[in-house]
Amino acid sequence: MNLILLGPPGAGKGTQARRLEDTRGLVQLSTGDMLRAMVAEGGPLGQQAKEIMAAGKLMPDELMVSMIAERISKPDVKNGFILDGFPRTVAQAEALDKMLEEKGLKLDHVIEMRVVDDVLVERITGRYTCAKCGKGYHDSFEKPKVEGVCDVCGSTEFKRRADDNAETVTTRLAQYHQQTAPILPYYQGRGVLKAVDGMADIDEVTKEIEAVLAS
């Protein structure tokens, strides 16, 4: 089974992808991670990507699709994949479909995790973690049982991501909506697009996704 999860940063794509990896044996493919791995491994594609990155240019669609084609040919992807971060344009979506068709594969589902921007900003900007063990907390939704003390390790040191601020999150949301809006009608036309409530409880989102996969 081959899927695309669409949703802005903070929508919970990573959490749901990890659950699908565990329950269905799928492999999450993050294009950013794949690019870094490909450059580290070397090889023709890696060298090409390294030169483009060094020049500060955007990766051409052909290279991105070739990278995905190479990755999904590996044995660990035999049960299917979850794409995160690609495609972002109709041209990329078309190129991806063409490559999959050439391999005798297809996208089974494209799942949009719909969010309410204002609520998502609150969700992201309130996040912080224990500096020692990494346990996650939130200003409103998940505070430590004892204020200022980590529930897990007892540390009193916490940290926040520098980009978890309202201005940055709002900009990222605007970019996501601008990039993603054109590809929704494309996948709608192909009959593979479904939406779930990305603002629901994590377990509820999982149930909604499983219902889509079972349809």
Image: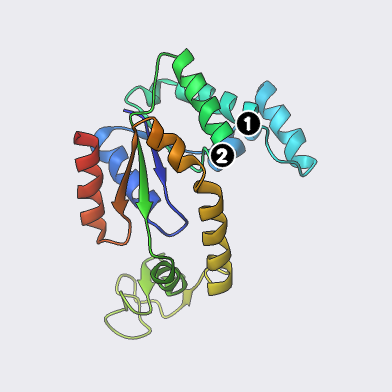
* Quarter of the image where one finds residue 83: top left
Q: How many marks?
A: 2
Query: Image quadrant for the N terminus?
Result: top left
Tell me the colour scheme of the image. rainbow
Estimate the x, y position of residue 164 in percent, counting from the top left.
52, 69
The residue lying toward the viewer, choosing from 110 and 145, is 110
29 lies above or below 65: below
**In the rendered view, does 13 fall on the left or right side of 39?**
left
SS for dot 1? helix
Question: Residue shown at 34%/45% (left/top)?
Answer: 18
Estimate the x, y position of residue 202 in percent, counting from the top left.
26, 57
Can you identify the residue that label 1 sits on?
61
Identify residue type, mark 2.
Thr
* Quarter of the image where one finds residue 80: top left
The residue lying toward the viewer, choosing from 29 and 100, is 100
Identify residue type, mark 1.
Asp
Q: Which mark is residue 208?
A: none
Can you identify the residue that label 2 sits on?
89
201 lies above or below 96: below
Estimate the x, y position of residue 107 in percent, counting from the top left.
38, 28
SS for dot 2? loop
| Spatial separation of the CA atoms under disc 1 and disc 2 | 10 Å
**Mark 1 touches mark 2? (CB < 8 Å):** yes
Question: Residue shown at 57%/27% (left/top)?
Answer: 65
